[in-house]
Image: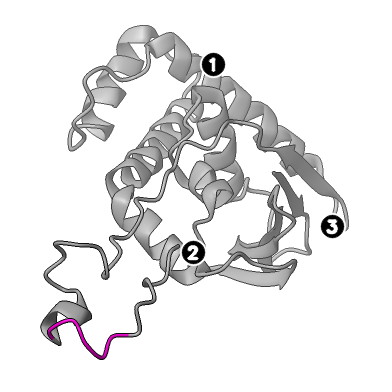
Amino acid sequence: MHVTFPRLPDHEAGYSVVERDDGVVYQLLGGRAGTALPHDIMHLVVERELGITDGIWGGIAAGMVFGSMRHVRGRRPPHVTERSALLKRTYRDRILRAELLGNLVEAIAALDDPSADEIRRLTGSKLSMLRMPEPPSPQAFATAARALQVEAARWARLRPGAELRYEWALPVTHHVPRPRDPSAPGNRRDPRRRLGGHGGSGRPGPRC
């Protein structure tokens, strides 16, 4: 998946262009343009550096369509809205985890050469609401923070009209549970069962 962030004139509405591997292209709306690193780049860099495949950008690659996304071109797969909604429900906690991890790395990147103990303290406070058996190591967080600093410096040097382009190559790990077929035997919601086996169309329900 390719993601392009154009540097627009200050204070204009920012956006990125997301080109999924299936050929579908979306415009992802962001905050106001300026020299500060866009929030969506922050998450892309952090998730890529920490190998988070089931977060925000992994979700977009798998088919999630957020409210800030606008379809530009490319044939969308069938039942795209239902698939996206099911993915969001299924992976809600993991998306929240990715959001909090991104905020943590952003906080680390704002520090001047933080020690491992400082990173552990920040981790404890920023991730206190998460149930993570073992968060990434302070070294992994520090590496991600340095990558974020590099991208922030690159973005700050861009002039309006230039752009940064990223490749999202992590494997898609979001899997959509297959909706239960309402005509399957034993399904109490089967309309043919309610009608005593008569009058149903016999066609299975939509699959995402």
**Is the magenta region chiefly helix, strand or loop?**
loop
Per the rendered image, the range of residues in magenta is 196-200
Q: Amino acid at mark 3?
A: Pro
Density class for disc 3 (Cα within 10 Å; few <14, some 14-19, many ≥20) is some
Q: Residue at x 73, y 52 (%)?
A: 5
The residue at which mark 1 appears reads as 143
Residue 103, image x and y in percent?
40, 39
Residue 112, image x and y in percent?
50, 19
Q: Amino acid at mark 1?
A: Thr
Q: Amino acid at mark 2?
A: Phe
Q: Of marks 3 and 2, which one's residue comes earlier in the chain?
A: 2
Density class for disc 1 (Cα within 10 Å; few <14, some 14-19, many ≥20) is some
- Asked whether residue 39 appears in the rendered view, the answer is no
Query: Disc 1 versus disc 2: distance between alpha carbons?
Result: 29 Å
Rendered position, 62 above or below 32: above
Q: Nearer the viewer, residue 64 or 101?
A: 64
Q: Residue at x 71, y 68 (%)?
A: 75
Rendered position, 93 above or below 24: above
Q: Disc 1 vs disc 3: which is toward the camera?
A: 1
Density class for disc 2 (Cα within 10 Å; few <14, some 14-19, many ≥20) is some
Residue 114, image x and y in percent?
43, 15
Q: Nearer the viewer, residue 78 or 188?
A: 188
Quick one: quadrant of the C terminus? Answer: bottom left
